[in-house]
Image (cartoon, helix red, strand yellow):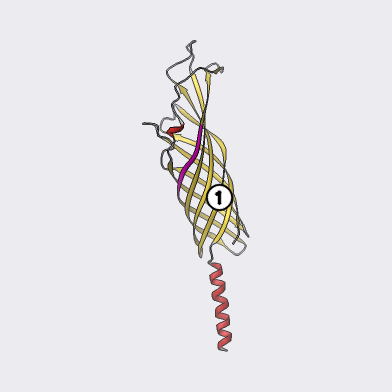
């Protein structure tokens, strides 16, 4: 009888320990980013697609969990604005579209709660901070006159590659679904620090993220 009780206890303990083992996995996704600024009357942002890929560890605490991640992120966005003063010899206004691309290594740490929890199916909500380290970056400009013709002359560019901050912070929140070993997330990243060193103008990057992940454990 004692051996039977010990065997049953061992099975229950083993099951409990397995249930709390961390999940290790990878995930890939698409992003769409735009820039918010305190001078929106001069600048406007256009959403463009980017991508990301990385790995995560999910530490399960019953319905709660903590999930640190390491992600490579390639964000792309377009910023439109009017160049002043007027530069065209015909006294036409010059407009510019700046396409900005930046590759970063991101470290999100999210805390989540499983609204629905089962062996086959979970529904989750989560939030947490993200620190982002720039690894590569590029800027390209396209100038047009007010009548729609391209302008090829030299213009004093208000932003340069050196204006990118090397480290930026985001706040992240979202919801997800787990089906067996697959995990689907929708996230919103709100820029907490400026993306650029641009004097008195604030530029913050805001990103929607759609990911598909695979849990190995």
**Is 16 placed left or right of 84 in the picture?**
right
Instruction: Measuring from the top left, give residue 161's x and y in whole percent.
Output: 46, 32
Please tell me which residue lies in front, 116 or 108. 108
* Residue linked to disc 1: 54
Residue sitting at the far top: 90
Q: Residue furthest left?
A: 200
Image position, residue 58 (x, y; %): 52, 59
Q: How many marks?
A: 1
Magenta region: which residues? 129-138
**Does the magenta run of residues contain 137?**
yes
Q: Report the residue at 54% width, 52% height from top.
A: 175
Residue at the spot 48% in from the left edge and 50% down from the top edge: 108
Q: Which residue is located at x 41 percent, y 30 percent?
A: 39
In the rendered structure, does residue 69 fall within the stretch colored magenta? no
Decide: is 75 above or below 85.
Answer: below
Under tag 1, what secondary structure? strand
Position of the C terminus, as image quadrant, is bottom right
Is residue 26 shown above or below 149?
A: below
Mark 1 surroundings: few (<14), some (14-19) or many (≥20) residues within 10 A: some
The quadrant where residue 214 appears:
bottom right
Q: Which percent across, then down, holds residue 15?
A: 57, 72
x%, y% of residue 118? Answer: 59, 64
């Amino acid at each position: 009888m004692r051996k039977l009780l010990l065997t049953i206890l061992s099975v229950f303990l083993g099951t409990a320990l397995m249930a709390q083992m961390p999940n290790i996995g990878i995930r890939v996704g698409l992003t769409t980013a735009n820039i918010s600024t305190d001078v929106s009357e001069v600048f406007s942002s256009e959403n463009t697609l980017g991508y990301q890929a990385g790995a995560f560890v999910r530490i399960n605490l019953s319905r709660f969990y903590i999930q640190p991640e390491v992600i490579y992120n390639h964000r792309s966005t377009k910023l439109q604005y009017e160049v002043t003063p007027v530069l065209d010899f015909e006294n036409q206004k010059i407009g510019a579209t700046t396409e900005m691309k930046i590759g970063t290594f991101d470290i999100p740490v999210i805390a989540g709660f499983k609204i629905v929890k089962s062996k086959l199916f979970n529904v989750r909500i989560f939030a947490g901070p993200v620190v982002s380290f720039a690894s590569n970056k590029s800027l390209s400009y396209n100038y047009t006159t007010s009548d729609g013709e391209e302008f090829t002359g030299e213009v004093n560019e208000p932003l340069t590659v050196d204006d990118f901050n090397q480290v930026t912070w985001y706040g992240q929140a979202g919801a997800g679904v787990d089906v067996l070993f697959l995990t689907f997330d929708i996230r919103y990243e709100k820029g907490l620090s400026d993306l650029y060193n641009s004097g008195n103008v604030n530029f913050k990057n805001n990103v929607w993220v759609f990911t598909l992940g695979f849990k190995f454990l």
